[in-house]
Amino acid sequence: MSQIHRLLLILAIPCVVAGCNGDRVEELERQVANLESQLENVRSKLSDAESEVDSLRSAIDDLDSAVGEFHYSDWRLVVSNVRSAASDVESAVSNVESSIAEAVSAAQ
């Protein structure tokens, strides 16, 4: 191998290595962008779950209020309110469970 070929080879090696590192850096940057997108999705799902928990708390308060009517109202009039409020709590629990499942799924 001539001196010129050796010199060109010596000069080419850092360029090839730099090119490989550049490709690796670009791949890592794509992976970071993908992970940031996934993290934002998980945050959004957790925010949805928090909102559903607030709705559940409200439904529980409504049920508590309906049950409290037994103290001063005819129980026959109160039962339908309690049933309705209990149904709302059941629905709210289902929504919370669904939101949490979506957040867990997004995190995987």
Image: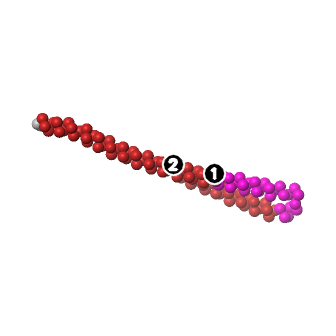
Q: Secondary structure at mark 1?
A: helix
Q: Nearer the viewer, residue 84 or 18?
A: 18
Q: Residue at x 55, y 49 (%)?
A: 43
| Amino acid found under the numbered disc labelled 2 | Leu
Q: Report if residue 106 lies within the magenta region.
A: no
Name the quadrant containing residue 3. Answer: top left
* Residue 78 appears anywhere in the view: yes
Outermost left residue: 2
Q: Residues within 10 Å of mark 1 (few under 14, many from 20)?
A: some
Residue picked out by circle 2: 39
- Picture coordinates of residue 35 (x, y %)? 46, 48
Bounds of the magenta segment: 49-78
As measured in the structure, the alpha-carbon distance from the residue carrying label 1 to the one carrying label 2 is 16 Å
Left or right: 89, with 38 as reference point:
right
Left or right: 10, with 40 as reference point:
left
Q: How is the image coloured?
A: secondary structure
Which callout, 1 or 2, points at the residue further toward the start of the chain?
Answer: 2
Using the image, tell me which numbered label, if any, was put on residue 50: 1
Left or right: 104, with 34 as reference point:
right
Name the quadrant containing residue 21. Answer: top left
Q: Residue at x 29, y 43 (%)?
A: 19
- Picture coordinates of residue 28 (x, y %)? 39, 45
